[in-house]
């Protein structure tokens, strides 16, 4: 029967599996999952037909839930469905949003943040997924995009109402393209022709969401388990975490199969001690950030035998999501993953993003050598990428490329004293000094005598020697800008 609630009509019929009521609130919804028996049902006119049973949801502890309501571009929407996908790097969730009229959109995870997309009609048929090589540039509807991710994915579970339903457990391609205006174009090859959607980054607080999952409920469930290597208790703190390390034995634990699933782990010898402790709170850029992850990375320029190293701290703020604090030999910087993909010159010597041109500083191969803490992407020791670092004055831009993904991050440099003060480590501020130490050329114009300049030079040399042997940012004299953001195997909506 059809019922009316205000101006919104919805369809309700008994589940053919258990008889419980199944509702369709969106005219675009063809499929639904019975909330009682998990039957997958398809709407055929005024009747429902059972076509199978859906697997249990993987509890990602997301703050979102069915029937949460918000506004996008001052238009109301309601979350009516949920799709969970798996790929090599873990799992991610897409929420189906019913908008005004008969339209539906998608609110998807995006590297610790979110992207809101709407269906997009392509003027020309989409090429085959195999023709869209990561890093390549192609045009859709007159706009250029860079292929940022090309993954084989499978639908593993679903909830609520769905406008489409790929074969459960059957792999298909999901390709994401991004451009220098911050747009994300997604091509879903789970149907033919591929379904296209277009959107951009959003903050949950800007969506004015109501009806979110109760925070206390999340805490009551808990996410604790015993380390599969040493048995010590491990607690997971974040909804999107795909990797965590045991503080007792430093093992890297894979969370992509979920708590209670197969907990794969890898032992780590010779732990690196971060300068800023895990769990520390710092005030940066007008917000309070907590250090939740740490990784030490090594780099090497092609054709160069010399290696260099840097540290990356993963920071978290409830409203702003994740950022990276990078400690490199030429200074500190703070960056976030970009939603779009800059346009890069064919030679790689320059890149343009949001109307700004950046010059390449470095190009190098990078490898993760040590990790600690919790990460929203799947981290592995020995993970390798090819990186390019760009700069435009104090603004930084970095690219990381792997076999299946291309990720970008942007931000700016920070004074070392600012970083030390932010984490209340002023007593150790000398340990934070990097390439932003006052250069000798500046001292020449400051009225200092020759003897003082020589003494400063000696002190700097001694400090550099100490740092190169003691600091975890060591590994060569090259003044690397670091990766400015780390490797995110999560990709676009994942």
Image (cartoon, rainbow, N blue to C red):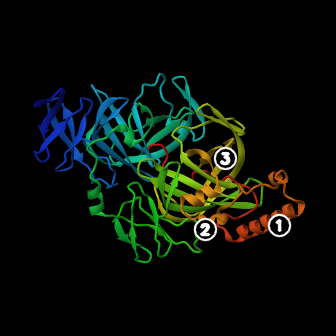
Dot label at residue 302 = none
Q: Look at the image and tell me whether residue 88 can be seen.
A: no
Residue 233 position, x and y percent, is: 38, 73
Q: Is residue 66 above or below residue 470?
A: above
Find residue 134 and report its image quarter.
Answer: top right
Query: Under tag 3, what secondary structure?
Result: strand
Q: Which residue is mark 1?
A: 458
Query: Under tag 1, what secondary structure?
Result: helix
Residue 277 position, x and y percent, is: 53, 67
Q: CA distance from mark 3 to mark 2?
A: 35 Å
Q: Residues within 10 Å of mark 2 (few under 14, many from 20)?
A: few
Q: CA distance from mark 3 to mark 1?
A: 33 Å
Q: Which residue is mark 2?
A: 427
Question: Which comes before the other along the chain, label 3 or label 2?
Answer: 3
Q: Is residue 355 above or below residue 427?
A: above
Residue 247 position, x and y percent, is: 47, 72
Determine whether, in the image, residue 280 is placed left or right of residue 370: left
Q: Which residue is mark 3?
A: 388
* Residue drawn at (26%, 49%) of the image: 54
Most foreground residue, 379 or 64: 64
């Amino acid at each position: 029967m059809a019922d009316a609630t205000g101006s919104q009509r919805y369809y309700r019929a008994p589940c053919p599996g258990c008889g419980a009521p199944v509702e369709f609130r969106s005219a675009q919804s063809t499929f639904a999952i019975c909330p009682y028996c998990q039957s997958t049902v398809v709407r055929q006119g005024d009747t429902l037909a059972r076509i199978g049973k859906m697997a249990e949801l993987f509890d990602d502890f997301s703050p979102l839930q069915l029937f949460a309501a918000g506004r996008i571009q001052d238009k109301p929407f309601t979350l009516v469905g949920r799709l969970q996908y798996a790929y090599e790097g873990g799992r991610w969730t897409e929420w189906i949003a019913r908008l005004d009229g008969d339209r539906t959109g998608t609110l998807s995870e995006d590297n610790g943040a979110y992207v809101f997309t709407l269906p997009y009609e392509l003027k020309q048929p989409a090429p085959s997924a195999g023709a869209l090589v990561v890093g390549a540039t192609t045009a859709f509807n007159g706009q250029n995009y860079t292929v940022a991710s090309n993954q084989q994915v499978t639908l593993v579970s679903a909830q609520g109402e769905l406008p489409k339903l790929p074969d459960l457990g059957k792999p298909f391609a999901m390709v994401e393209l991004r451009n220098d205006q911050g747009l994300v174009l997604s091509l879903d090859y789970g149907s033919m022709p591929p379904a296209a959607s277009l959107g951009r980054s959003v903050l949950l607080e800007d969506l004015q969401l109501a009806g979110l999952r109760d925070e206390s409920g999340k805490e009551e469930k808990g996410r604790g388990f015993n380390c599969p290597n040493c048995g010590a208790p491990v607690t997971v703190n974040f909804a999107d975490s795909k990797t965590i390390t045991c503080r007792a034995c430093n093992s890297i634990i894979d969370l992509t199969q979920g708590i209670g699933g197969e907990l794969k782990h890898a032992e780590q010898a010779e732990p690196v001690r971060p300068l800023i402790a895990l769990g520390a709170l710092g005030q940066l850029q007008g917000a309070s950030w907590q250090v939740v992850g740490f990784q030490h990375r090594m780099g090497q320029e092609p054709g160069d035998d010399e290696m260099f190293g840097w540290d990356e701290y993963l920071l978290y703020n409830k409203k702003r999501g994740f950022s990276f604090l990078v400690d490199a030999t030429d200074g500190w910087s703070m960056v976030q993953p970009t939603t779009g993909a800059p346009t890069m010159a064919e030679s790689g010597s320059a890149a343009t993003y949001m109307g700004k041109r950046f010059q390449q500083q470095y190009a190098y191969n990078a490898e993760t050598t040590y990790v600690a803490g919790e990460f929203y992407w799947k981290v592995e020791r020995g993970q390798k990428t090819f990186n390019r670092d760009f700069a435009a004055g104090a603004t930084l831009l970095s690219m990381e490329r792997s076999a299946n993904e291309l990720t970008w991050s942007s931000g700016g440099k920070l004074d070392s004293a600012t970083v030390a003060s932010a984490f209340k480590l002023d007593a150790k501020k000398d340990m934070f000094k990097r390439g932003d130490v006052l250069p000798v050329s500046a001292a020449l114009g400051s009225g200092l005598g020759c003897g003082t300049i020589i003494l400063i030079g000696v002190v700097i040399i001694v400090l550099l020697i100490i740092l190169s042997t003691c600091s975890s940012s060591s590994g060569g004299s090259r003044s690397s800008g670091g990766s400015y953001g780390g490797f995110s195997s999560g990709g676009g909506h994942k």
